[in-house]
Amino acid sequence: MKEKALVLLSGGMDSSVCLLIAKKEYKFDIFALTFDYGQRHRIEVEKAKEIAKKYSAKKHFIIELPLSKIGGSALTDKNIEVPEGKINRNEIPLTYVPARNIIFLSYATAIAEVNEIYNIFIGINYIDYSGYPDCRPEFIEAFEKMINLGTKSGVEGKKFKIYTPLIKMTKKEIVLKGKELGLDFKLTHSCYNPDENGNPCGKCDSCLLRLKGFKEAGIEPVL
Amino acid sequence: MKEKALVLLSGGMDSSVCLLIAKKEYKFDIFALTFDYGQRHRIEVEKAKEIAKKYSAKKHFIIELPLSKIGGSALTDKNIEVPEGKINRNEIPLTYVPARNIIFLSYATAIAEVNEIYNIFIGINYIDYSGYPDCRPEFIEAFEKMINLGTKSGVEGKKFKIYTPLIKMTKKEIVLKGKELGLDFKLTHSCYNPDENGNPCGKCDSCLLRLKGFKEAGIEPVL
């Protein structure tokens, strides 16, 4: 029997590549986890469902989280505008959602523990990471240590491991890895600020990074 | 101007004593945070509102969290019975909610960050702790380290500190501290399995611990 992995699947390109790595390179049985957290780009959730189905996830957990009540980010707070047109690597952007990955990984830990899954995959990225502190390797290391101290499974010796296979990849490398593993790019969505039909804006940080990745990989862009 | 503290307030005796310590001993301005997580003992949430009001919290955040969807605990899963009548210090009990304090503290971090609060109080207890791994000091230490690596505030040098003033206190000491600080015990609720009117069962782990605390403190018990 295959070992199980829980993959955080946003519906974006990165988490989809991450899912295919867990499935095709690590040969894990895939359990997908998606959060519906009041994001502007909720089309992601629908995309995630299609992706989980297409790549044969054994189960797809969808959890509604009231992050919009916390506020403080352009991604969840309608009073803050999504910035356009520049990627500034020297400051933490307005699209930073306070403690988002901390909350996501905490839920993932709970769901993993209940379902006896000890491998957790998250497609975060340190190189083209847009300045989010919760995408850094030292954060992930500290998180893994914390859950192995704070859960029944961890204390009883079934250690959780957090995998971040994309953490040191450039967007170009992520695009190439997706192509290698047969990812259907048109199923994935990256835009922070889509129109009412779910079409990407082509202008936000996330769209710009995605376009840059395709361009550098020498592949026709799929936004 | 006073410094601010965010206090996790369940409505139970321990978190209420913790709030009074933050307020009267540390002299912080109090912001309370309560989770409505589908617990069997939801009367707690109403008690928490009264306590926050009585002790002049500047703001009371109440967050609905879908922990019951995760399952795996007698406290949130109606298919698992709340155990009665014995406290076994050698095993993790059925009332363990997977990763509960991890999720609670993650939300607390997000709310603290948005509201520029860098002191977080949680009334967990290591001595009479009923066997929960996420009540141990080494867990809290690892959690504090993790959030200071994974948040904008932490990275920018405004370090979060997690206070656990009750962590090494016995229930007796907690009762005595509550009395010393003027806690109105009848406002607090501890029972895991109250009847439909919110009356405590007197039989669950939590009721037994509370009764033991009052008895040892030589104070007339208030269940």
Image: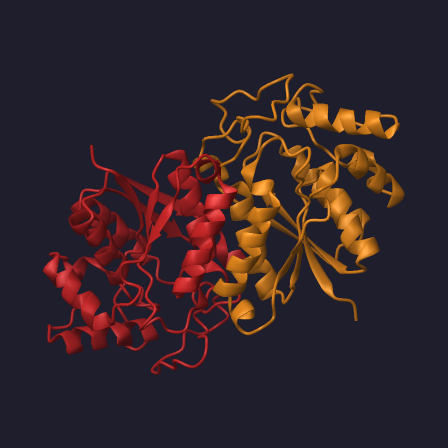
Chain colours: A orange, B red
Can you say which quadrant of the picture contains the N terminus of chain B?
top left
Front-most of A190 and B185? A190
Is residue B223 something one can see in this rendering? no
User: What percent of the width, then of the height, locates residue B172?
Assistant: 19, 72
User: Which residue appears at 20% of the width and 53% of the height?
Assistant: B21
Quadrant, the C terminus of chain B:
bottom left
Name the residue rendered at 66%, 42% in the picture. A124
In the rendered image, residue A114, in percent from the top left (x then y), is placed at: 58, 65
Residue B156 visible: yes
Q: Which residue does the image show at 68% across and 18% down from the upper left?
A: A203
The quadrant holding residue B217 is bottom left
Taking depth in this image into account, of A218 and A53 the one nearest to the observer is A218
Q: Position of residue B213 (x, y in %)?
A: 21, 73
- Left/right placement of residue B191 relative to residue A208 reads left
At 74% from the left edge and 37% from the top edge, which residue is drawn?
A: A13
The residue most toward the top is A85
In-image side of A151 versus A195 (left or right): left
Image quadrant in which you'd find residue B170:
bottom left
Total numbered labels placed on residues in the image: 0
Q: Is residue B196 above or below residue A157?
A: above
